[in-house]
């Protein structure tokens, strides 16, 4: 049967691997190339790289680093951050990445998203949605590394992205990012109920049990892991790791 | 030397990268004269069926490939869309396929109750129907990375090497004589893909 994908989601700032907490302060993790070598040896399902400050700092993707990453990896790869036009997306796909993750540009210039999707297929485009609950408990969507609120609600926005040609949605809870507190199952379920394409749950993973919960209750097609795969434990030092496959299989009922 | 045919669709770099890792010589070529001298052909492909067939027809690849594959019978492997192109036709398009293996390419369609999302995307297992050189000695519990909305159905069951379960058992690796097709991406499937490509290099 088709396995639920469990995807280390790695944050870059330029050439450094980092990890944020609630989209804010970030800790330095290390060199991305060494890290991907470890994940390659661990035979992880897929890797996602997000240059979290590229849009805000108006930087273009670091193609040299991406090329080195692609040369080391024999699993599917996705990249997001600072992809503002079709040509840049095309370069990244030709380097050996399968998917382009679009966040800010997907909102601001949907025509770029549509062009990539038409040319390379919907499976090559991941729509990234960052959500945050306001003090009244209402979910709101942010772009530009969580700095700019948009007027659409998450369900509306997800449906709009599907209509424009994304093949997958990366749904990130800003409140849970880096907290190890578990996924925001409620918002993930809302989106998986509203769209027919796969949704990757992101933000808050702290244990294998959290993964099981968001797959079963949230109906997530895939799960992204951040802190859990780069730190030993909450509040402890850097350790690149991946959950034990037998425990994962048991919790995902294989 | 394996010749990876560059007819303008698909990520050829990853395939060549994996050949490099396993120490197999390969070249990417769009040159009909180079392809005419190929010892082994890998037909990659990502994208739509008609767009690929259009390029193969318009670029003059079809005649050269027919000579190599059907005439000289050199080992040939189609991967992902490249496998679907080996068939007679696809529900994705109106153009004829290469027709090297009697088969058709059909869209996945499921009831809502089955809760299966198309494309079939992710890692899935394979079950052997007929043993073959291509699938010999795969590491334990073989799994591969798939991304596709259409699947191949062979007309003759003897052409099925392996199946994969997604709602039902579809034909994930097929063979007729010197022509092989694999629906997944071996170049993105860790040691499992490496072994398969290594096997292909030895055929």
Image (cartoon, coloured by chain):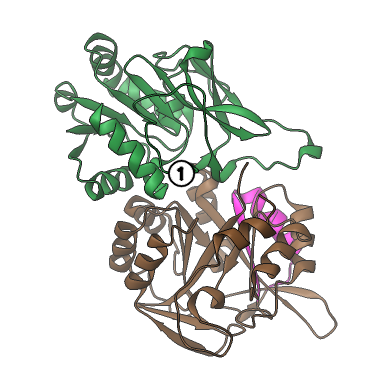
Chain colours: A brown, B green
Q: Quadrant of residue B187?
A: top left
Identify which residue, A54 or A2, lies in the foreground.
A2
Question: Quick one: label 1, few (<14), some, or many (20+) residues within 10 Å?
Answer: few
Is residue B33 shown to the viewer in this render?
yes
> Would you name the residue on which mark 1 appears?
B140
The x and y percentages for residue A198 are 65, 51
Q: Quadrant of residue A24?
A: bottom right
**In this view, B19 is above or below B131:** below
**Residue in view at x 19 percent, y 38 percent:** B27
Q: From the viewer's perspective, is A248 left or right of A55?
A: right
Q: If the image is split into quadrants, where does the N terminus of chain A sit?
A: top right
**Residue in view at x 22 percent, y 32 percent:** B3
**In this view, B115 is above or below B160:** below
Name the subunit of mark 1.
B
The x and y percentages for residue A195 are 73, 51
**Residue in view at x 18 percent, y 29 percent:** B31
Magenta-tinted stretch: A150-173
Is residue A153 shown to the viewer in this render?
no
Is A52 covered by the magenta stretch?
no
Q: Secondary structure at mark 1?
A: loop
The x and y percentages for residue A28 are 43, 86
The x and y percentages for residue A229 are 51, 73
């Amino acid at each position: 049967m088709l396995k639920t994908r469990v995807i280390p989601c790695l944050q870059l700032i330029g050439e450094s691997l980092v990890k944020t907490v609630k989209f804010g302060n970030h800790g330095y993790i290390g060199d991305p190339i060494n890290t991907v070598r470890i994940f390659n040896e661990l035979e992880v399902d897929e890797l996602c790289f997000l240059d979290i400050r590229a849009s805000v700092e108006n930087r273009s993707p670091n193609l040299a680093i991406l090329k080195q990453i692609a040369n080391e990896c024999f699993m599917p790869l996705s990249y997001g951050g600072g992809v503002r036009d079709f040509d840049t997306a095309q370069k990244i796909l030709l380097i050996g990445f399968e998917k382009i993750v679009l966040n800010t540009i997907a909102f601001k210039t949907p025509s770029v998203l549509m062009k990539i999707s038409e040319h390379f297929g919907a499976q090559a485009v991941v729509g990234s949605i960052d959500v945050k609950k306001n003090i009244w408990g209402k979910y709101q969507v942010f772009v530009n590394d969580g700095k700019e609120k948009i007027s659409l609600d998450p369900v509306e926005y997800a449906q709009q992205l599907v209509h424009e040609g994304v093949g997958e949605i990366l749904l990130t809870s800003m409140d849970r990012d880096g907290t190890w507190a578990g996924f925001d199952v409620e918002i993930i379920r809302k989106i998986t109920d509203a769209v027919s394409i796969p949704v990757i749950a992101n933000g808050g993973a702290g244990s294998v049990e959290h993964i099981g919960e968001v797959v079963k209750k949230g109906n997530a097609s895939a799960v992204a892991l951040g802190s859990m795969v780069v730190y030993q434990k909450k509040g402890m030092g850097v350790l690149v790791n991946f959950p034990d496959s037998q425990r994962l299989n048991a919790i995902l009922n294989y | 030397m394996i010749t990876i045919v560059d007819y303008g669709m698909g990520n050829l770099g990853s395939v060549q990268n994996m050949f490099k890792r396993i120490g197999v010589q390969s070249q990417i070529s769009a040159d009909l004269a180079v392809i005419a001298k190929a010892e082994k052909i890998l037909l990659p492909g990502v994208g739509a069926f008609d767009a690929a067939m259009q390029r193969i027809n318009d670029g003059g690849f079809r005649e050269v490939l027919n000579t190599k594959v059907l005439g000289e019978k050199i080992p040939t492997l189609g991967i992902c869309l490249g496998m679907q192109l080996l068939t007679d036709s696809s529900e994705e398009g109106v153009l004829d396929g290469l027709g090297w293996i009697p088969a058709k390419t059909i869209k996945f369609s499921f009831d809502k109750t089955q809760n299966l999302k198309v494309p079939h995307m992710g890692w899935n297992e394979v079950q052997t129907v007929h043993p073959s050189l291509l699938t010999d000695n795969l590491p334990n519990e073989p799994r591969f990375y798939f991304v596709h909305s259409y699947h191949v159905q062979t007309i003759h069951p003897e052409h099925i090497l392996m199946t994969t379960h997604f709602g039902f058992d579809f034909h994930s690796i097929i063979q007729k004589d010197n022509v092989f097709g694999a629906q997944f991406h071996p170049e993105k499937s860790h040691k499992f893909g490496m072994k398969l490509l290594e096997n292909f290099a030895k055929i």
